[in-house]
Amino acid sequence: MAKKLEITLKKSLIGRNQKQRANIQALGLRKIRQTVIHNDTPQIRGMIHLTDFMLTVKEV
């Protein structure tokens, strides 16, 4: 079974550049404290790496 990642947005998108906003939106996050679950893939890890200071990531 593939590992899953629980990703939570912990900071606001106000004042962030367009690339960071697009990554957060592509992950499916819209509101602060919203949580989504994704498969642990290199693509998702790369998106998390670009915005890791705004996210909380937990392996499920």
Image (spheres, helix red, strand yellow):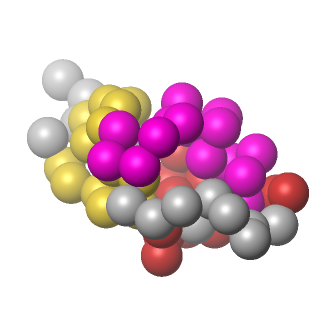
Q: Quadrant of the N terminus?
A: top left
Q: Residue 5's x, y, as percent?
A: 29, 42
In the picture, measured across the screen, residue 1 lies left or right of residue 40, that is: left
In the picture, measured across the screen, residue 30 lies left or right of residue 56, that is: right
Residue found farthest to the front: 14
Res. 56 in view: yes
Query: Residue 12, located in which quarter of the rendered image?
Result: bottom right
Nearest the viewer among 34 and 52 is 34
Residue found farthest to the top: 1
Which residue does the image show at 41% across and 49% down from the upper left?
Answer: 32
Nearest the viewer among 3 and 54 is 54
Query: Residue 18, located in which quarter of the rendered image?
Result: bottom right
Q: Is residue 16 magenta?
A: no
Please tell me whether residue 53 is drawn above or below residue 6 in the rendered image. below
Which residue does the image show at 53% across and 45% down from the upper left?
Answer: 44
In the picture, measured across the screen, residue 57 lies left or right of residue 25, that is: left
Query: Residue 22, located in which quarter of the rendered image?
Result: top right
Residue found farthest to the left: 60
Which residue does the image show at 82% across and 58% down from the upper left?
Answer: 19
- Counting the numbered discs, the total is 0
In the picture, measured across the screen, residue 44 lies left or right of residue 18, that is: left
Which range of residues does the magenta coloring cover? 20-34
Which residue does the image show at 65% across and 38% down from the upper left?
Answer: 25
